Every structure is written in C-alpha cells, then in structure tokens.
Amino acid sequence: MRMKPIFVAVVIGLACVVHPSPVQACDCAVGPTCATFWSTQLAFIGKVDRIATPGPGTEETTLIIEEWLRGEVVKNEVTIVSTGVGVSCEYDFSPNTRYLVFAYKAPNGLWKAFLCGGTTPVDSVSGKEAIKEIRSVLRSREPGQVSGQVAFDEDPAERVMPGAAITQTLVSLQNDQRTLTTRTDARGEFRFARVPQGSYALSVGLPPNAADVPPMQVVVGAKACVQRYVFPHRRE
C-alpha cells in the first residue's frame, strides 16, 4: 500500500441545521473548545464598537480587540461581515457587547463568524468557561490529540457522504522533528493520543481504488483535540 496525500472533507466536528423560523435560524452542535480554538484562523476577545447595515440582511460588525488570543495577527479592530442575518448560520452580533470571537477568513478576504463556530458573549456561561480553558491552554505545554476517520466519499458529485470505512490503513503525522504513525480500526477511525505541539503533515496510506488527493497540514497546540475526516473519492 502506498502513502498518498489526503482529502479533508470536514475540518472540525461542527454542525449547523437551518430551520424555517427567521428568529432562530440555526441550531448548532458546537465542538469542544480544544478543537475550535486550534482550528480557527483568529481568536480574540473584543467589544462591538459599531454595526453597519450596507444592505438587507447584511451586517458589518466592527469589534475593538481587547485581547488577541491566537491566529492571524491583526490591528486594534476587526470587522466581521454577516450575510443573511436571521436566516443563515452567520453570527448576529449585538451592540455594545463583549464577545469571545472565533473568526474565519472567506475566499474574498472578509472575516466571518458562525453560530456553529464557538463565538459567544464573554459574560455567558459558555464564554466564561471557554476563556478560562483557553487561558489555561496558553500557559500549558501538555501534548494534544489528533483523531478522525478515513472512509470513501460515496457521493462526490453532490455532497460528502462517507461510506465504506478504509480499515487498517497507515496514518502518519510528520514534521522535521518526528514521525508518528497509527492505523485505522474497523470503523476507519484513528487517534494519536499524545502529540507534541507543532505543525504536522497528515498522510494516509490509501488503497489503489482511492483517488489521489492533496496533503493536509495540521497545527497541534497544547491540550488540543484536533479532528480530521478523510473521505477520498473512489477511482473510476
């Protein structure tokens, strides 16, 4: 069996289900802080300074950064653009409120925050717990975890639909300092229990009937619980 790069169909275990009610558009199953924090492109604590509405259902929320936590280095303020407010899964900020923000950059360069992405008011129960955990993590040197599943994508033309598990296949995490290996189990699942902090290339030994797919870079931080799902297409 040869080692091939992998295709990552899902980055973190988050779900967002759209409902018909415009009041509560999304019901989100948010992943744990140890996954969200190390997967986001920008994490910070900030207060809403102003909210502009350049068009129907569109909000441009500018937050003054009180504490930068990790990710892309930004200036003293960040503008989050939310479209389809009330009927989409993009976050609807409230004026004069302090938030823990997990932001992601869209292909057009705009910053986004999602109801499913962990963003929450600082004074909420979830906000207080997440901030406490994040600050503990930033002081820690403990290893993290990387886990996931390898299976064929049975509906590549439409959507990701994992099917037959790819079992007993070699999975590796590698950088200049070390190489860690394991194998998938009967359900195609894998887990690296103690991964030192750093950036790694995640590779999977795919069978001959799996299509070639690009490599994956994984950043592991202290106490991280990074999840990656590998769903290659079948070869024709």
Image (cartoon, rainbow, N blue to C red):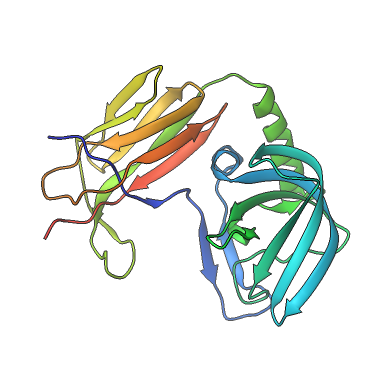
**Number of marks in the image?**
0
Q: Quadrant of residue 44?
A: top right
Residue at coordinates 67% horizontally, 68% vertically from top-left?
A: 82
Q: Position of residue 13 (x, y in %)?
A: 47, 50
Q: Position of residue 95 (x, y in %)?
A: 85, 64
Q: Quarter-wise, where is residue 128 in the image?
A: top right
* In this rendering, position of residue 139 left or right of residue 27: right
Q: Is residue 173 placed above or below 167 in the rendered structure?
A: above
Looking at the image, is 212 positioned above or below residue 73? below
Residue 3 position, x and y percent, is 20, 35
**Point 37% across, 18% down: residue:** 178
Residue in view at x 63 percent, y 66 percent: 90
How far from the left and from the top, in percent, is residue 236?
11, 61
From the image, which quarter does the N terminus lie in?
top left
Q: Nearer the viewer, residue 176 or 124?
A: 176
Instruction: Answer with left or right where residue 178 lies relative to residue 233.
Output: right
- Of 62 and 187, nearer the camera is 62
| Foreground of the two, 109 or 234 | 109
Residue at screen point 77% across, 63% down: 61
Horizontal arrangement in the rendering, residue 35 relative to residue 173 (left or right):
right
Depicted 190 relative to depicted 120: above or below: above
